Image: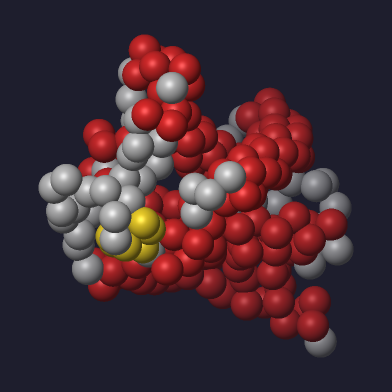
Amino acid sequence: MQKSKIWDGAVRLFHWSQVILLAGLWYSADQEWYGLHMAFAYTLAALVISRLIWGFIGSENARFSHFVKSPRKVWQWLRQPSQNTVSGHNPLSGYMVLLLIILILLQFLTGLMTSDDILTEGPLVALVPATWVSFASSFHQWNINLILGLVAVHILAAVWHQWRGDKVITAMITGQKVIEVKTPLQFKAVGLYLLLVLILMVAFYSWQGAVVWEMLRSEWA
């Protein structure tokens, strides 16, 4: 077998950017650097929403239809993983990807409705009932721990696969893997994904950029 391309630039960019930004979001919140926290949040939201769109229009194995399988397929893979080689996410990790995307989007949405009653509040706080703000604030605090816990599980699983010879971490860096691909995968240019991210970034920062910039100035003055 020879090396074959299994990951496009969009999937790899999203994957590693997500890791860095989640760490930054946790640390900035812990340090109460809310301007930086908001900047990270809008950037991650643009990446995640673009990945959601990419799951329908992107490269072949980046699409949800390629890697989100039925529970029966997941069970079959769990029983004989070595005999079911996949060119991309395996059936179990496919569910993990989908779950993380959903939880991160919920984290972003609740962040828009979160208030600490002292220094900061999300841009939707004034538009929703107080009960929503209270729930969103609580959810936002514990959901990040759930996300980081799932990321830790995902990392441990990737390290285990890498150690066992299934070079999943290497493949996510290089985009290539030693695997038999009977039919060449169809890939789309990373530029289309970057365009989606750029459009969303412009939308978010046109909406809240002035607030983010003012908070950053006050924090780093």
Residue under the image location 29 percent in, 60 percent down: 2
Q: Is residue 134 left or right of residue 21?
A: right
Taking depth in this image into account, of 210 and 153 the one nearest to the observer is 153
Q: Is residue 46 left or right of residue 65?
A: right
Q: Position of residue 134 (x, y in %)?
A: 73, 31
Q: Position of residue 209 (x, y in %)?
A: 53, 72
Res. 133 visible in picture: no
Q: Position of residue 32 (x, y in %)?
A: 83, 62
Residue 5 quadrant = bottom left
Residue under the image location 70 percent in, 52 percent down: 121
Whether 163 is drawn above or below 175: the answer is above
Q: Position of residue 49 (x, y in %)?
A: 39, 51
Whether 193 is drawn above or below 144: the answer is below
Q: Is residue 217 left or right of residue 100?
A: right
Res. 198 visible in picture: yes
Residue under the image location 48 percent in, 36 percent down: 93
